[in-house]
C-alpha cells in the first residue's frame, strides 16, 4: 500500500512538472553568465577570424612591395657607385659629371627613405632585409580589434582593393557587435559594483543622514569615485606597457592608455611587441567598457546639474532684468554673476547637514523672495481708465 502511494505521488509530481535540481555545470555557470561569456567569446572569434583574413589579403602585397623597393634601392645604389667610380677614373673636374653625381645622390636618398618607410632595414650587408613584418598574425588581429573598436591608430592600413573592401564590410558588421559587447560588459560591471556595495559595512548615522538629505551630493561622490577608479585602471595599464616596451616611460604608457580608452587613437605611440598584442587587445576591450560606463555616469551628472542651474537661474535672470529696467541705470550684472556662482554651489555636494542646512536653504529662499518682491513700497498712483465707445451711426 505504501509502495502504491509512493508511486502515485511520484507520477503526480512528474505530471505536474516539478522542477528538477540544477546540474553541477549549471550551478557553476548560470545561464546569465553563459550569455555574457558567449557574447564575449563570439567577439573574440570574430576578431581573430578578421585578423586572419586581413593577413591573407595584405601579406602577399606587403612582400611584393618590399621586393620592389629592395630592387629599386639596389639599382640606384649601383648607379651611384658607377658614377663615383667613373668620376675617380677620369680625374677631371667636369661639371656635367658633378651635376650627374648630385642628381643621382638625390635620387638614391629619396629611394632610401621610401624603402625605410616601407619596412626595409638599412643593412647593406644583409641585402636590405625587412625590419618588421607589418601583417603578421598578431599584428593583423590587433589591427582588426582597432577597426572594431573604432580606434584606428593608422600605423598599418589595408592597401589592396580586396583588403579595403573587406575592411568596410567587416567594420559594418563588427562595430555593432563590439558596441553590444561593451554595453553588456558595462552592465556586468555595474552589477558587480552594486553587489560589492551591498557587502560593505553600514555607514555611520551622521553620514547616512547627510547622504539622504543631499542625493545630488551622493551622485556627485559616485561620479568622483568612478573617475578615480578609471585613473587607477589607466595607471595599471601604464605600468604594464612600461614593462613590455623598452623605450616607453610611465607617462608614455598612461598617455597611450588614455588616448586609446577615449577612442582618439592618434597612432603616435603604438605597442611593438607582437607577443603582447593579444593581452593588449583584451586590456583595451575591458577598458573601453569601463571608460564608456564612467563617461556616461559623469555625463548624466553634468546634465542633471545643468538642468538644475537652468531651472533656478531662468526666473532669477528675468527678475534681475526687470530690476535693471526699473532702476534706471542700476547695473545688476555683477549681482547676476554672483547669484550664478551661488546656484552652482547649490548643485554641488555639501558636507553640512541637518538643522544648519535647512536654515541655509530657508535663508536662500527668503533672499529669492526679496528679489522677486516689488522694489518700491510706496503706494502706486491710482489709474484712471477711460472707456471710449464708438458708435457705428
Image (spheres, rainbow, N blue to C red):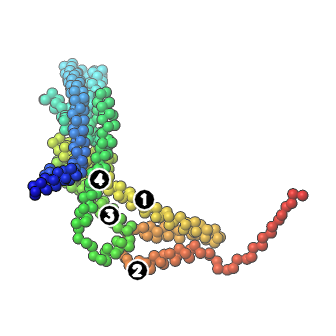
Q: Mark 4 or 2, which is nearer the eye?
A: 4
Instruction: Tell me which label, 3 or 1, sits earlier in the chain.
Output: 3
**Residue 336 in view of the camera:** yes
What number is the disc on residue 303? 1
Q: Position of residue 232 (x, y in %)?
A: 24, 58
- According to the image, label 2 marks what residue? 356
Q: Secondary structure at mark 1?
A: helix
Residue 252 seen by the camera:
no
Estimate the spatial distance between the alpha carbons at disc 1 and disc 4, rounded to whole Å. 20 Å
Mark 3 nearby-residue class (10 Å; few <14, some 14–19, many ≥20): some
Residue at 40%, 60% (x, y): give it.
Answer: 302
Asked which secondary structure carries label 2, the reply is helix
Q: CA distance from mark 2 to mark 1?
A: 28 Å
Give x and y (percent) for residue 281: 22, 45
**In the rendered image, which quarter is residue 379 located in?**
bottom right
**Which corner quadrant holds the C terminus?**
bottom right
Q: Which mark is residue 203?
A: none
Which image quadrant for residue 316?
A: bottom right
For the point 44% across and 80% down, which residue is it? 359
Q: Which of the 4 quarters of the picture holds residue 353?
A: bottom left
For marks 4 and 2, the one nearer the N-term is 4
Q: Nearer the viewer, residue 13 or 34?
A: 13
- Residue identifier under label 4: 186
Amino acid at each position: 500500500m505504501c509502495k502504491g502511494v509512493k508511486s502515485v505521488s511520484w507520477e503526480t509530481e512528474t505530471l505536474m512538472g516539478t522542477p528538477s535540481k540544477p546540474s553541477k555545470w549549471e550551478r557553476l555557470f548560470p545561464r546569465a553568465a553563459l550569455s555574457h561569456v558567449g557574447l564575449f567569446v563570439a567577439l573574440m572569434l570574430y576578431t581573430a577570424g578578421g585578423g586572419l583574413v586581413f593577413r591573407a589579403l595584405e601579406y602577399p602585397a606587403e612582400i611584393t612591395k618590399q621586393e620592389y623597393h629592395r630592387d629599386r634601392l639596389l639599382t640606384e645604389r649601383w648607379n651611384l657607385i658607377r658614377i663615383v667610380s667613373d668620376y675617380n677614373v677620369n680625374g677631371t673636374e667636369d661639371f656635367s659629371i658633378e651635376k650627374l653625381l648630385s642628381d643621382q645622390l638625390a635620387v638614391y636618398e629619396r629611394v632610401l627613405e621610401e624603402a625605410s618607410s616601407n619596412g626595409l632595414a638599412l643593412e647593406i650587408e644583409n641585402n636590405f632585409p625587412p625590419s618588421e613584418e607589418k601583417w603578421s598574425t598578431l599584428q593583423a588581429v590587433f589591427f582588426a580589434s582597432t577597426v572594431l573598436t573604432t580606434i584606428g591608430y593608422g600605423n598599418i592600413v589595408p592597401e589592396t582593393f580586396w583588403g579595403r573592401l573587406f575592411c568596410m564590410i567587416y567594420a559594418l558588421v563588427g562595430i555593432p557587435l563590439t558596441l553590444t559587447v561593451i554595453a553588456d560588459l558595462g552592465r556586468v560591471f555595474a552589477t558587480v559594483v552594486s553587489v560589492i556595495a551591498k557587502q560593505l559595512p553600514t555607514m555611520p548615522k551622521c553620514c547616512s543622514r547627510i547622504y539622504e538629505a543631499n542625493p545630488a551630493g551622493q551622485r556627485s561622490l559616485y561620479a568622483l569615485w568612478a573617475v578615480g577608479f578609471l585613473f587607477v585602471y589607466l595607471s595599471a595599464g601604464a605600468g604594464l606597457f612600461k614593462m613590455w616596451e623598452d623605450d616607453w616611460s610611465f607617462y608614455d604608457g598612461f598617455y597611450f592608455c588614455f588616448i586609446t580608452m577615449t577612442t582618439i587613437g592618434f597612432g603616435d605611440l603604438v605597442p611593438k611587441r607582437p607577443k603582447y598584442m593579444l593581452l593588449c587587445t583584451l586590456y583595451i576591450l575591458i577598458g573601453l567598457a569601463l571608460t564608456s560606463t564612467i563617461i556616461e555616469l559623469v555625463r548624466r551628472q553634468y546634465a542633471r546639474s545643468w538642468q538644475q542651474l537652468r531651472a533656478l537661474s531662468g526666473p532669477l535672470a528675468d527678475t534681475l532684468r526687470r530690476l535693471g529696467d526699473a532702476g534706471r541705470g542700476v547695473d545688476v550684472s555683477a549681482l547676476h554673476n554672483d547669484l550664478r556662482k551661488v546656484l552652482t554651489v547649490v548643485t554641488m555636494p555639501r558636507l553640512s547637514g541637518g538643522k544648519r542646512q535647512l536654515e541655509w536653504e530657508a535663508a536662500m529662499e527668503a533672499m529669492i523672495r526679496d528679489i522677486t518682491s516689488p522694489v518700491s513700497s510706496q503706494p502706486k498712483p491710482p489709474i484712471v481708465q477711460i472707456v471710449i465707445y464708438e458708435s457705428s451711426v
